[in-house]
Amino acid sequence: MRLDGKLIQEKGHDYLMDALDFPDYYGKNLDALYDCLCEMDLEIEIVNAGLVDKDIIDTFKDAAAENDFLKLKMFP
């Protein structure tokens, strides 16, 4: 799964919810993002990662460290 940091910057949690097919009850906050990512079995590539808010990047990194089935790659 490839995510575009520019779209994350522009549309935030709405983009992440659609792109990652999160459930309708997704809370659109960092805690909800972390919870959903910790349940995924997926490789995620974030392009234009330098455009993404540090708190969102940290949430992706924390979830990948917790979830052995979530692989994360970031590209500037």
Image (cartoon, grey):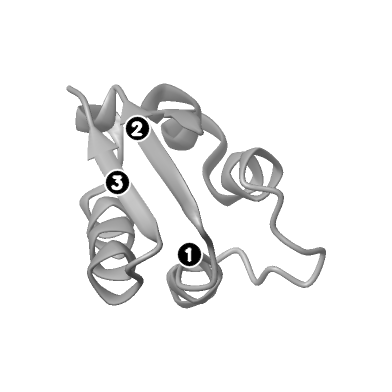
Q: Secondary structure at mark 1?
A: helix
Dividing the picture into quarters, in which one does residue 45 lie? top left
Q: Say few, some or many: other residues with alpha carbon within 10 Å of mark 3 (under 14 / 14 to 19 / 20 or more).
A: some
Is residue 65 or residue 26 the one in the foreground? Answer: 65
Which residue position holds label 1? Answer: 37
Residue at image point 57% right, 51% down: 13
Instruction: Give, as a three-letter code, the residue at label 3.
Output: Leu
Q: Is residue 42 left or right of residue 70?
A: right
| In the rendered image, the vertical position of residue 11 relative to residue 71, given as above or below | above
Dividing the picture into quarters, in which one does residue 67 lie? bottom left
Q: Secondary structure at mark 2?
A: strand
Q: Position of residue 18 (x, y in %)?
A: 70, 42
Instruction: Give, as a three-letter code, the residue at label 1.
Output: Leu
Q: What is the spatial separation of the Cα atoms under label 2 and label 1, in whole angstroms?
A: 14 Å
Is residue 26 or residue 10 the one in the foreground? Answer: 26
Which residue position holds label 3? Answer: 72
Q: Position of residue 35 (x, y in %)?
A: 50, 76
